[in-house]
Image (tube, rainbow, N blue to C red):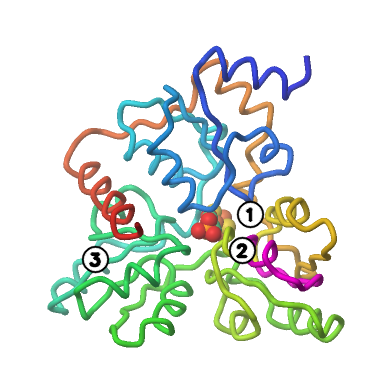
Amino acid sequence: MTKQEEIQKLKEEKDAVILAHYYVRPEVQDIADYIGDSYFLSRRAVDMPHRTIVFCGVSFMGESAKLLNPAKTVLMPDAKADCPMAHMVTMETVERARAQYEDLAVVCYINSTAEVKSWSDVCVTSANAVQIVKNLPNKNILFIPDRNLAHFVADKVPGKRIIYNEGFCPIHEHMKAEEIRKLKEQHPSAKVLVHPECSSEVTALADYIGSTSGIIDYAKNSTDTIFIIGTEQGVRHALQQAREDAVFFFPETEPICVDMKMITLDKIIDVLKNGSNEIKMDDGQASAAAERTLTRMLELAQ
Ligand code: 13P
Ligand code: SF4
């Protein structure tokens, strides 16, 4: 039996569904029932009939799925796969802003721990941050943890005062604008599609800025055939499947999220067999508050 066949058999036995983010390895994307960006996956997590969700991604994704589905079993193929940015904000930052600004909403990127979500008023993803912030009644917005997504939102929603926090995704932040510029010189007709987690030096070079799904949809619906991609290299798999006729160039220093790449077929087989790495959330007030920020996002992003 191949690993793929073994996963299929175990999924049926355990009544499990596999969700995967676009940044995981191609062979993991290929066995997933659903692949998507963070927003799509959080939506999917709430309407799955299965008893068990195997989340091929980093811990904030599994935690979010569990908060939205407390009665379900959520398994992480690797419990150590974590997003460093999810931890890059302190409670003091939130408390200070709440004391300083009236009419404040604390908006947290879904790339945050459940604890960070519990301090916040509403959650967003890169796909819906602009829409949600624009529609909030509050004038002042503390945006945590990502300063780059916060800058992107501030550009698009000039009517609000955005208060920044100094968090960032190391993979997108360290993308070199110089390497994108070099690719543009080599391929002058290429369209540049980048993620809003990139620095403003990189986003300034883009024709389109959007979530991983946004980038894939742009390429899918475009008549262009050459693209320069400013996000994690895992999206290459879906891009190439969507546009066999197109060429995709990534920066020379390829952006790789080592945490996403920790997910392997062997680890998926292992958690399906043993039920290991189950996400546990206590059912206290903090979990209830974190769940409210996620549910509010799902309502406001409709
Ligand atoms: P999206 O899935 O919202 O594009 O975010 C990218 C990311 O960094 C996920 O960890
Ligand atoms: Fe976190 Fe960046 Fe990896 Fe996404 S790509 S999980 S934001 S470290």
Element under label 2? helix
Which dot marks residue 171? 2
**Residue type highlighted by circle 3:** Glu
**Residue type highlighted by circle 1:** Cys
Q: Is mark 1 within 8 Å of ligand 2?
A: yes
Q: Nearer the viewer, residue 202 or 50?
A: 50
Instruction: From the image, tell me which residue sits under label 3.
Output: 92
Q: Position of residue 184 (x, y in %)?
A: 79, 83
In the rendered image, residue 223 lying in the magenta stretch gets the answer: yes
Q: Position of residue 32 (x, y in %)?
A: 62, 35
Q: Nearer the viewer, residue 236 or 40?
A: 40
Image marks 1 and 3: residues in contact by CB distance under 8 Å: no
Instruction: From the image, tell me which residue sits under label 1.
Output: 257
Could you give the CA–CA distance between mark 1 and mark 3, rounded to whole angstroms? 29 Å
Quadrant of the rendered image containing residue 173:
bottom right
Say which residue appears at 72% left-offset and 19% top-offset: 5
Task: State which region is magenta.
Answer: 215-230
Q: Position of residue 239 (x, y in %)?
A: 72, 57
Q: Is mark 2 within 8 Å of ligand 2?
A: yes
The answer to whether 217 is drawn above or below residue 39 in the figure is below
Looking at the rendered image, the disc whose residue lies closer to the viewer, 2 or 3, is 2
The answer to whether 107 is drawn above or below residue 33 in the figure is below
Image marks 1 and 2: residues in contact by CB distance under 8 Å: yes
**Residue type highlighted by circle 2:** Ile
Q: Nearer the viewer, residue 95 or 47?
A: 47
Which numbered disc flags the more N-terminal residue, 1 or 3? 3
Say which residue appears at 58% left-offset and 58% top-offset: 213
